[in-house]
Image (cartoon, rainbow, N blue to C red):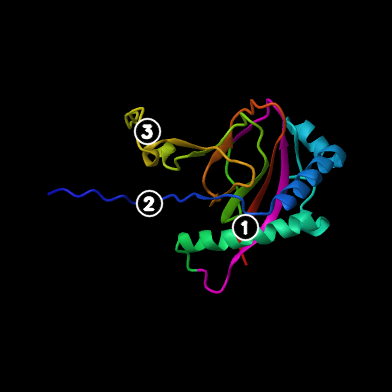
Amino acid sequence: MAEIHDLFVTRIYRAESIAPAKLNREVENVALLLAAEDTVGLKWCEKHGYPGYTSYDSLNDLPWRFPEFERLVKYIDKHAMAYAKELHWDLRGTKPVCDSLWVNVMPEGGSHTSHIHPNAVISGTYYVAVPEGAGPIVYEDPRLAMMMAAPPRKKNVPESFKSHVNFRPQVGTLMLWESWLRHEVPLNRAEGNRISVSFNYCLG
């Protein structure tokens, strides 16, 4: 009698409508303001070929500068703790603490290549504006580089067997994942800006 054991689970956390619609609109307004006025961030985007705008390298204190982001972080904090419990972490008196947070305003034609988030334990994105046709977030099987001669999978395999898995967010969607998990944002084919807030959590 044979047994199959499913091991080494990779857990992705998704929640919907985590913040009030009014707060979401306020965050969107601030994001568009930054995309127009953050000259340091815009120069960084131009230098590095980043389509649209991100405050990633220019403003590392958004929750301190803007009460809208401070309130948003409080909503995300609750989910980060819930996710840590789902991961069965022994926190030993610590808790997930938002270490960095930045805005992304991605126009039509923008994308974000595959990457990870070093020096963090939980990373995530909150979706502020998702125009019709905007691309998903795509997660990569962390074992992919070690599969070498493994045969390709059949087309209609269950989600847990896929090498890449797409999640299509809506306005108000929160996605959390462990920071070592490689992910990407494919080409935005939608008319209009795909606006999101990304962040990292460490233990503190």
**How many numbered circles are shown?**
3
Towards the viewer: 33 or 100: 33
Q: Position of residue 186 (x, y in %)?
A: 59, 30
The amino acid type, in three-letter code, at marker 2 is: Phe
- From the image, state whether disc 2 or disc 3 is nearer to you: 2
- Seen at 59% across and 51% down, the residue is 123
Q: Is residue 22 above or below residue 153?
A: below
Looking at the image, residue 92 lies above or below residue 203: below
Q: Which residue is mark 1?
A: 201
Find residue 8 and name its label: 2
Say which of marks 1 and 3 sits in front.
1
Residue type for callout 3: Met
The boundaries of the magenta stretch are 91-113
Using the image as rendered, state which of residue 19 and residue 201 is in the foreground.
Answer: 19
Using the image, determine if residue 36 lies above or below residue 188. Answer: below
Instruction: Determine if the magenta segment contains residue 131.
Output: no
Residue depicted at x 33% and y 51%: 7
